[in-house]
Image: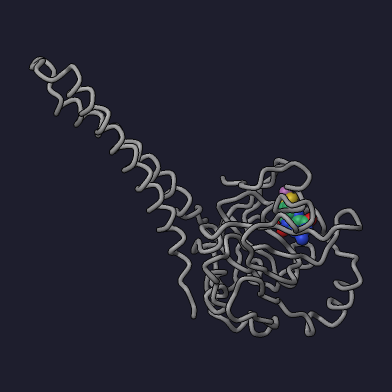
């Protein structure tokens, strides 16, 4: 059965609403309790007004929480073609040296497959041709690296949510983990992870093209993640597999990413 995971978003909303309602109920009870104990009969203080004004602040809290969520769902700025950077600086690994990568690159990635597994109903193994023939989204966005540089590029590729829907995400899945073919330290493969809100964001792509050309090796050939509301290190290059997981405790350092295992924060929202 294929499940539409945006329900994770509404689940979060529901949880927040429930929490606010609980707080409101408690507030109401304690106010009514206070009224019953001593304030009843004091007609200078309207219990109803007090209740209403306190409920008002609970509403404000709820609104703020919703705005926060809306913030995570809202779109990253997209730019006109005239603003595309002449060179999109490659960073981190720029030419993977692992045997796996070298062998696949030697054959123009004809034997490469993107595997989608873990907590899914239908594991997938997608060729580059298949990914290139899928409906693609094209977007011109700005990439911000923590090292202090930015670049604007035009990315194209299937929306991650479409692929996840094809695989059928199980309700127990909480994160999407991206496994890469390169090793910055010659020992650990680069990897990253995002939650379901980021995974089903309409601008979250598996990009096979940069500025209308097949993705160059420097920028992550054959396929890289674009997760536009977060910092550059989240955008895993040289993808080989995606797994849906309930937690990442048992993946490498257990912090959800190569740089996270070395101290970076997991949620890198911008
Ligand atoms: N597999 C892999 N993905 C990676 C990295 C890396 O070293 N290996 N570096 C990250 C960092 S820190 C940044 S800023 C971007 C750089 O993307 P670019 O090479 O297209 O500029 O990729 C990210 N994804
Ligand atoms: Mo970066």
Residue 106 visible in the shown view: yes
Count of numbered circles in the view: 0
Quadrant of ligand 1: it is bottom right
Q: Quadrant of residue 210?
A: bottom right
Q: Position of residue 49 (x, y in %)?
A: 15, 26
User: Can you say whether 100 is above or below 252 in the image?
Assistant: below
Looking at the image, is 66 positioned above or below residue 28? below
* Left or right: where 4 falls relative to 132: left
As displayed, is residue 102 above or below residue 127? above
Question: Can you give x and y, in whole percent of width and height, for residue 198 in the image?
Answer: 54, 58
Q: Is residue 88 visible?
A: no
Q: Residue at (89%, 53%) from the top-left corner?
A: 185
Residue 136 on image: x %, y %? 55, 75
Which residue is painted at 71% across and 54% down in the image?
A: 249
Describe residue 195's horizontal placement relative to residue 11 as left or right. Answer: right
Find residue 47 and report its horizontal and vertical position in percent: 15, 25
Quarter of the C terminus within the rendering: top right
Identified at 70% across, 83% down, the residue is 127
- Establish if 54 lies above or below 127: above
Q: Which one is in front, 7 or 44?
A: 44
């Amino acid at each position: 059965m294929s499940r539409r995971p945006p329900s994770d978003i509404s689940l979060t909303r529901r949880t927040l609403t429930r929490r606010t309602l609980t707080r409101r109920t408690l507030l109401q009870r304690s106010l009514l309790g206070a009224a019953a104990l001593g304030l009843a009969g004091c007609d200078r203080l309207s219990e109803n007004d007090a209740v209403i004004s306190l409920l008002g602040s609970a509403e404000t809290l709820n609104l703020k929480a919703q705005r926060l969520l809306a913030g995570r769902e809202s779109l990253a700025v997209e730019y006109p073609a005239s603003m595309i950077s002449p060179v999109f600086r490659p960073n981190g690994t720029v030419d993977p040296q692992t045997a796996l990568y070298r062998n696949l690159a030697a054959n123009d990635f004809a034997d490469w497959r993107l595997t989608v597994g873990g907590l899914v109903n239908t594991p997938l193994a997608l060729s580059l041709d298949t990914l290139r023939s899928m409906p693609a989204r094209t977007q011109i966005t700005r990439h911000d690296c923590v090292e202090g540089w930015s670049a604007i590029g035009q990315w194209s590729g299937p929306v991650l949510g479409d692929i996840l829907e094809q695989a059928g995400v199980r309700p127990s899945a909480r994160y999407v983990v991206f496994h890469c073919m390169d090793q910055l330290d010659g020992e650990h493969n680069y990897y990253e992870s995002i939650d379901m809100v980021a995974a089903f964001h309409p601008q979250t792509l598996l990009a096979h093209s940069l500025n209308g050309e097949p993705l160059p090796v420097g920028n992550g050939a054959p396929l890289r993640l674009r997760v536009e509301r977060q910092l550059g290190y989240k955008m895993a290059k040289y993808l080989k597999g995606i797994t849906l997981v309930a937690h990442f405790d048992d993946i490498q350092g257990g912090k959800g990413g190569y740089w996270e295992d070395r101290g970076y924060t997991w949620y890198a929202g911008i």
